[in-house]
Image: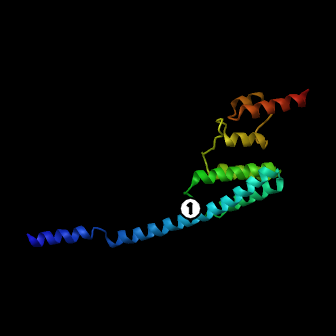
Amino acid sequence: MLAIGAALMATACNPVTTAQQKEGIGFRQARFAEISAMRSYRQCRDDALALDGQARADGSSARYLAAARLLETCEAEVGPEAASVGVDERMRAYALGIQDYFKGGDVARARANLETFKQTFSGADLYFADGASFIESMEILLGQRDRSAVGEFSLANVSSEMKSELRRVRYWKRN
């Protein structure tokens, strides 16, 4: 009886096999790499957000462009080890970079990055506080959708202010 109890205690104390131990170590190393990559990404993003704040305060197109370039660099440096981590915050930062390119006057780069956004975060979209779609709003602002189609504004998930402004512009172009 004592021998059976000792045998049960020995197996109960060592339930993890060598293969499981190695997998655990690999998991910890992979997790550490993810955490390190995200920490670097967040520091880079915070620097870009500070530049964006300065651009907003000054109305400086050069600072908007610098912030956009830095946000683009931050996303490019994430690497495969953290590609699936923090997707929502990366989407928001990359979207801000697209807006900053637009505000800075580099429409071509904003268009290219919007396409990259749609490919990288396939099937995902961001929504403004009023429920307007980020992707649809930027497509209209960047001229990737036909602005002259009357029904297009009704079908697009963009803010009512944007619809009103685009209708006003169309009216004054025709009259």
Residue 154 x, y percent position in the rendering: 71, 28
Q: Quadrant of the N terminus?
A: bottom left
Quarter of the image for residue 153 reads top right
Which residue is labeled 1 in the image?
82
Instruction: Give the answer, above or below, for where 146 lies relative to 30.
Output: above
Mark 1 Cα shell of 10 Å, populated few (<14), some (14-19), many (≥20): some
Instruction: Give the answer, above or below, for where 36 lies relative to 148.
Output: below
User: Going 67% across and 53% down the picture, which residue do you hit?
Assistant: 94
Instruction: Give the answer, above or below, for where 36 lies relative to 50.
Output: below
As rendered, which of 24 and 67 lies closer to the eye?
67
Left or right: where does residue 118 sit relative to residue 174?
left
Q: Decide if residue 148 is in sight here.
A: no
User: Going 76% across and 32% down the picture, which residue do you hit?
Assistant: 163
Q: Element type at marker 1?
A: helix
Residue 150 x, y percent position in the rendering: 77, 28
Q: Quadrant of the C terminus?
A: top right
As rendered, which of 80 and 86 lies closer to the eye?
86
